[in-house]
Structures are given as structure tokens and as C-alpha cells.
Image: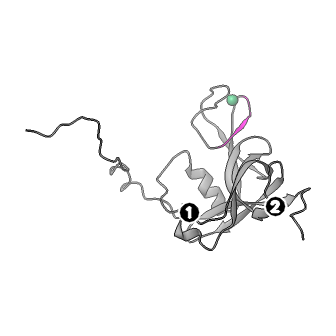
Amino acid sequence: MSSPVSGPERPVSGPADDAVDEQPVASSRPPGYEPDLDGDPWWEALATHRVVVQACPACARHRLPRMPSCPWCGTAGGDDVEIAGTGVVYSFVRAHRPLTPAMVDAVPYAVAAIDLDGGGRVFARVEPPEATAIGVRVRPTFVDHDGWTELRMAVLHSAGPEVGA
Ligand SMILES: [Zn+2]
């Protein structure tokens, strides 16, 4: 009996083997990053400690993550514009247990969805974690790792009593 080619179980799909070998990942990408024309300018900007978003050539709205066309008006393309990177915490989680061995020394840490001034939303760690709260203003900081740069956010000020010095 021949093996079925279709059925309820499918092999775990992995990344396509083609293209990956021909398109080496640049050095400013985090581990596990796969080549991505839409995402590459983001990482290249972070490597030089800049935050860039796309601006629609028709309606001028900012968007992040980068994508081929405007989600509001449908116009194709976008212009990379450098922004201050400041914003407001929309939502967050605070991790008190390390979810991976690499994070053992990082707990507790906070990861937030941040509404950037001028438009666009980004996920980033926020420091200090105890001052992270919905609605606090943050500014970007840049953490250089081995071969790539991570965007983090720092709480600018908070009305809460936990911020301290
Ligand atoms: Zn638009």
C-alpha cells in the first residue's frame, strides 16, 4: 500500500530551502530572522540607532510594520521616514518567570505594545518594568547585541508611585 499524499496529518512545514541560501541575511538582523524585503529597512535603521516607519505617499499616514501598500487608502508603496520614536504604552505584559533560558537574568521584564507618536504601533521591552503601565509615555533606547540592534523603550515619566528615582 502506497503512502498517502494527503491526509489529516501534515509534515511540519519549515522555511523554504530556496532563496535562503541565495539571499544571505545581513549582519544587522536578530537570530532567526528570515530575509524580508518589507522588514529589512527597519533593522537597518535600528543598527544606526534610528526609528523609521512608512509614510503613505497619498494620505501620509504612518504605518508599522512595513507593508507593500497603505492599509487605509490602498495606495501602493511607502516612503521611509525617520521619527523620534516616542509614544504611549497601549498595553503590556510583565514577565516574572523566564520563558526561555536566555531570559533568566532578565526577569522581571515588561513587553508592551506602543502607539508611536504620529502613527504606527510597535512591540518592545519597556524599562523599568515596574514603571510600565498603560498610558505612560516612552522614548526609544537602542541595545546593541552581537550583530543586531534591539529597540527598547524607556518610561519618560509616570504619575504612579512606583517610578521612584
Ligand atoms: Zn494611505
Residue at 78% over, 63% down: 130
Task: Kindly give the residue lying farthest to the front in the view shown.
Answer: 97
Chief SS of the magenta region: loop
Whether disc 2's CB lies below 8 Å from ligand 1 is answered: no
Q: Looking at this view, is 65 or 45 the one in front?
A: 65
Q: Residues within 10 Å of mark 2 (few under 14, many from 20)?
A: many
Q: Furthest-top residue in view?
A: 73
Q: Looking at the image, how many numbered discs can be counted on the residues?
A: 2
The answer to if 108 sits in the magenta stretch is: no
In the image shown, does 12 or 37 lie closer to the viewer?
12
Quadrant where the C terminus sits is bottom right
Q: Position of residue 14 (x, y in %)?
A: 36, 50
The image quarter in which residue 67 lies? top right
- Disc 1 marks a residue whose amino acid type is Leu
Is tag 2's residue or tag 1's residue first in the polypeptide sequence?
1
Determine the secondary structure under disc 1: loop
Name the residue: 46% across, 53% down.
34
Look at label 2 and name its amino acid: Ala
In front here: 110 or 40? Answer: 110
Q: Residue at x 87, y 64 (%)?
A: 163
136 horizontally vs 66: left or right: right
Q: Quadrant of ligand 1?
A: top right
Q: Mark on residue 160? A: none
What's the magenta region? 59-64
* Residue 99 tag number: 1
Identify residue for label 2: 131
Element type at marker 2?
Answer: helix
- Is 24 above or below relative to 57? below
